[in-house]
Image: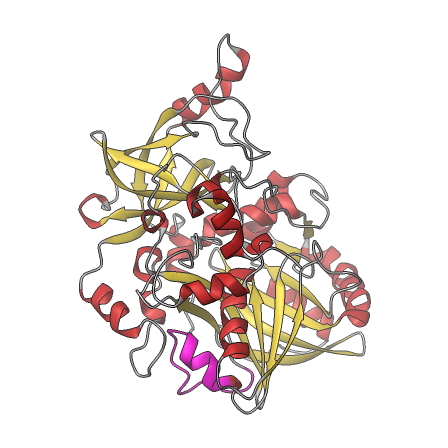
Amino acid sequence: MAETLAAAIDRVGSAVDLLRNAQARPTIFPVTAEFSNWRSEQLSWRRSVALLDQSHHMTDLFITGPDALRLLSDTGVNSVQSFAVDKAKQFIAVNHEGYLIGDAILFFLAENEFDLVGHQMVIDWVQFHGETGDYDVTFQRDGNSIVRDGDPALYRYELQGPNALALMEAVTGAPVPPTRFFHMATFTIDGVQVRSLRHGMAGQPGFELFGPWEQGERVRDALLRHGEKFDLVRVGSKAYSSANLESAWVPSPLPAIFSGHDTDRYRRWLPAASAGSLAGSLASERIEDYYVTPYDLGYGRSVAFDHEFIGRAALEAHAANPQRQKVTLVWSPDDVAAAQRSMLEPGTPAKYIDFPKARYGLYQVDRVLVGGVDVGISHDAGYITNEQVFASLASIDNAHAAPGTQVEVVWGEEPNSAKPAVEPHRQVRIRATVEPAPYSRFARENYRSDAS
C-alpha cells in the first residue's frame, strides 16, 4: 500500500523538511522540449500564432452525477449561479482558514457532467471531498502522461497569437462565431467535431481545442497544414512552461493542506507521492508561512460570497483586509549576469538560474526584501523573450507593491536542501523592480477583455 502524506510527515518529522528534501524531480512537461528554439517559440504567441500541445502535462478529473455541481459549489469559492453547459471558469478552492488549495479550469460539458483540468493539488482536494462526503457523484481520473499508462482520454491543443482567429477560420472553412472569454463552441475540422474554449494568453486571441484522443492526430495535422500560411509555430515544453510569466498566472503555489481544520483526514487519504517539493530561499519551519490567500495572487474577482463553501468565513476576513497583492518583479540584468558568471569563477557559485524557467521545485518560494526586511515572496521566475527581461511573479505587502519600488530577491537555499535539482551553492541577493502583473501592457489591457 502506498505511503500516505500523513505517514510521510510523521516519518520525517515535519512537513517543511519533507517538502524541502523531497526526492521528486522538478515537474516537466512530457512533450518535445523545443521544435525550433524556445526564444523563437516564445515570440510566436505575440507575433504570429503558436500551437501548444496540452494533452500530456495536466490531469483531467471527470465528475458526473446529480450532486456534481453541489460538490463544486461546496468546495469552490466561485459562484455557480449562472454556470451552464458550454461555459468554463477558473475554479479556486481554499482550506477552512481561507488559504489557497489551488486552482484549475472547470469545463461544464453537459448536464451533470464536468471536467476539472490542471495540476493535481485542487483536483485531489475535490475528489477527496466527493468520495468522503454525502455526494451522489462518480469520478473518472485521467492523470498526466508522467503517471498514466497508455494514451490520454482527450487531446488538447492551444492556439494563441494574433493570427489564431484567421487560422481557425481557414481550418474550419467558416467564420468563427463571436464567443466570450471562457465560453465554448463546437467546430468541424477535417470532418471531425471539435470543442473549443475561447481562451487567451498574454492578451492574444486564443482557442483551446479538445476531443477524443484518437481524433487528435487528424486535428493536429489539419492545423499544421493550414497554419503554414499564417506562420504557425509549434511550441515545445521549454517555452510553454514559461508562458505563465506573461499572463501572470502562478501555476503551483504551495497548497494549504499541511495544517488547519480537518486537513488531517485529507493527509491520511492523500498519497505521499502527491505532496510535491518545496524550493527557494524562504526557510521557515512554520508551514503556514508558505501559504497564500486568493487575494495574494489576484484572484479576488473570482471569489463570490453568494454561497456556502469550505473556508467562506475565514475568506471573508481575508477579503476585508488583504495584506498582499500580485506583482511582477523585473530582476536586475547585472545581478542575474553576476549570478550566472559565478559558475565561471573560483569558489562556490550562486544557485544555477535556468532559462527560460528557473523553478527547481514544484513550489518555488523565495524571500523578497526591502531594506533587509521581508516584504513578500517570489514565485515562478524566468525569461520573457517578448519583453527581454528576466522576471518573477510575486506576492508583496501592499506598502511595497507600487510600480517602481526597489526590492531584493534572495536566490538560493541556505542550508542547501537535498533535492536532486539542488547543487552546492551560495545564496545571493538580486535587485529587482516592482512592476504590474501582467508585465506586458497589452496583456493587462486585453486579457479577459470580453469576459462576461
Q: Is residue 18 above or below residue 99?
A: above
Return the residue nearer the eye: 50 or 288: 288
Corner quadrant of residue 370: top left
How are the residues colored?
Answer: secondary structure
Return the residue nearer the eye: 57 or 173: 57
The residue at the far top in this view is 346
State left or right for residue 290 relative to residue 322: right
Residue 81 among magenta residues: yes
Residue 95 among magenta residues: no
Return the residue nearer the eye: 410 or 442: 410
- Residue 374 in the image, given as x and y percentages of width and height: 25, 37
Which quadrant of the figure contains the N terminus?
bottom right
Q: Is residue 107 above or below residue 231?
A: below
Instruction: Identify the main secondary structure in magenta.
Output: loop
- Residue 59 in the image, given as x and y percentages of width and height: 62, 64
Q: Is residue 170 above or below residue 7?
A: below
State left or right for residue 238 relative to residue 452: right
**Which residue is drawn at the image coordinates 50% and 87% (left, top)?**
84
Q: How many marks?
A: 0
- Residue 74 in the image, given as x and y percentages of width and height: 41, 80
- Residue 187 in the image, given as x and y percentages of width and height: 68, 79
**Which residue is drawn at the image coordinates 39% and 76% (left, top)?**
78
**From this viewpoint, is residue 300 visible?**
yes
State left or right for residue 251 relative to residue 232: left
Q: Is residue 256 above or below residue 348?
A: below
**From this viewpoint, is residue 278 visible?**
no
Q: What stretch of residues is rendered in magenta? A: 69-86
Which quadrant of the figure contains the C terminus?
bottom left
Corner quadrant of residue 405: top left
